[in-house]
Image (spheres, helix red, strand yellow):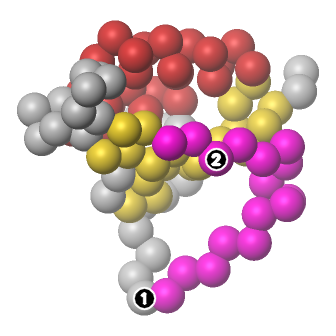
Amino acid sequence: MVKMFVIMAYDVNVERVTKVLHVGRRYLNWVQNSLLEGELTNAQFARLKADLHKIINEEEDSVVFYVLRRQEYLDKQILGLEKGGQTIMI
């Protein structure tokens, strides 16, 4: 099973923030406000996008995905407090 490393950033209307976060945490790890990351299969990534598409308003909201073939290609550097964790909430 081939996995990819996905970073999801979102900027949505305050009415939908909790719903978008809840859906995102079903698939990815919360990193900090409006930012999640984790490994997904192609099928999981497709389901995540489909689930989010049902929630967001494309006229007002934005969800951005950065997709890397492997997490090893990512050099993550943090300044200050590291928020979030490595657990997925179901």
Question: Helix, strand, or loop for circle 2?
Answer: strand
- Residue at the (46%, 58%) spot, across then down: 31
Residue 50 placement, left or right of 77: left
Question: Helix, strand, or loop for circle 1?
Answer: loop
Classify 10 Å Cα crowding around label 2: few (below 14), some (14-19), many (20 and above).
few
Instruction: Tell me the amino acid under the disc marked 1.
Output: Gly
Q: Please tell me whether residue 49 belongs to the stretch shown in magenta.
A: no
- Residue at the (30%, 46%) spot, across then down: 11
- Residue 13: x, y in percent? 16, 38
In this view, 42 is above or below 82: above
In this view, 77 is above or below 58: below
Instruction: Tell me the amino acid under the disc marked 2.
Output: Tyr
- Residue at the (32%, 58%) spot, across then down: 33
Residue 77 placement, left or right of 28: right
Q: Which mark sits nearer the N-terminus, 2 or 1?
A: 2
Residue tagged 1: 80
User: Magenta segment, which residues?
Assistant: 64-79
- Residue 21: x, y in percent? 32, 37
Asked whether 58 or 48 is in front, the reply is: 58
